[in-house]
Amino acid sequence: MLTGGASAAEVILAHGNPPAPNPRGLGADMFGELLASCTKGAITVNVAHSATMGDDVELLTSTAAGVIQLTPNSQGATGQIIPEINVIGLPFLFDDAPTAWRVLDGEVGKMLDEKAQAAGLKILGFWDNGIRHVSHLNKAIKSPEDLKGVKIRTPPDDMTLAIFRAFGANPAPLAWSELPSALQSGVFEAQENPLSNTYSAKIHEITPQITFTAHKYEAAPFFANLAWYSGLSDTDRACVDEAALGATWYQRGASLRTSTSLIEPMKAEGVTFTDIADRQPFVDATKAVYDDYASRMPDLVAKLRQVTGK
């Protein structure tokens, strides 16, 4: 059974990122191919990219309401509806993306899926949105002091806002689509994102100083409308699960490759990259963020600390 006004043979998958070769665009296309193949064309996927059906929060709301069936979304936007999702982005929690995948594919992911289902959503997989780094108009970030007072754009994500406030920066949320003009006009002087997002939106052309801050990891949870998903036949639901698993690993691989393969092309286009010699001052500056979330979501934070050793 299909809901939300889609035809019997078509479902809508909408996301806010550019199409392929952006990793989220690649994953969306792959999911559509795999689902059509598994169902022998009985279910096809109409992919709407680049926020043509709304920004991330709007897409989540539309998915929960059954207006659309599927959205691979942003962790920050999801946190406004499912606050527990924010804990994935605890500062310096994951040393690399594969470690995060292992954790999210286990008990932590199941705990978060329970919270999602209470909001009318089903998590089909945790896609990758990468390790995040700061890009600035004109300076490298070598210590927390370099972020004092810096006007930095963040997603609408309480965790990211808390991290940069702890650094002494002046963070504020802004829709992704509005970021280039805000940087060009001087409303913001910096932003933070994985390299794939920074590059695909040409933000590196505006903020050519990129520091490998690696201040947090972000997933891109892939959601289905729970009522639609639950109403599928056992065979079709198995196909959705199978297609989601294949697309999740495909998207993760694309994201991981992009995170390293973009460095040289970005250098050739004028980007200056900076490594941080001593990360401990950044870690120390964000201790209060852990304390805050541990007091509000003790079970999840305790589980994350147990499985990561942080």
Image (spheres, helix red, strand yellow):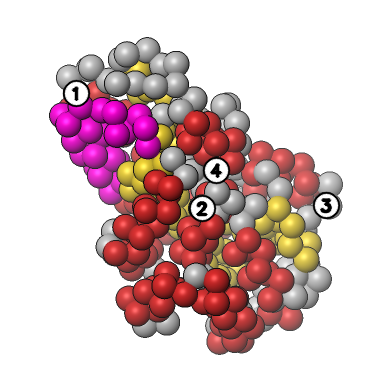
Q: Earlier in the sequence, mark 4 or mark 2?
A: 2
Magenta stretch: give its range.
226-250
Question: Can residue 140 be seen?
Answer: no
Residue 150 position within the rendered picture, expressed as x and y whole percent measured from the top left: 78, 67
Of badges 3 and 2, nearer the viewer stands 2
Q: Nearer the viewer, residue 265 or 48?
A: 48
Residue drawn at point x = 57 percent, y = 80 percent: 291
Residue bearing the label numbered 4: 200
Quadrant (top left, top right, bottom left, bottom right) of the N terminus: top left
Residue 251 lies, with reference to residue 158, above or below; the image says above
Residue bearing the label numbered 1: 39
Q: Earlier in the sequence, mark 3 or mark 2?
A: 2
> CA separation, marks 1 and 3?
49 Å
Residue drawn at point x = 47 percent, y = 75 percent: 298
Judged from this view, the residue extending furthest toward the front is 118
Residue bearing the label numbered 2: 82
Residue 100 lies, with reference to residue 230, above or below; the image says below
* Residue type beneath disc 4: Ser
Residue 302 covered by magenta stretch: no
Q: Earlier in the sequence, mark 1 or mark 3?
A: 1
Residue drawn at point x = 44 percent, y = 40 percent: 120
* Residue type beneath disc 3: Val
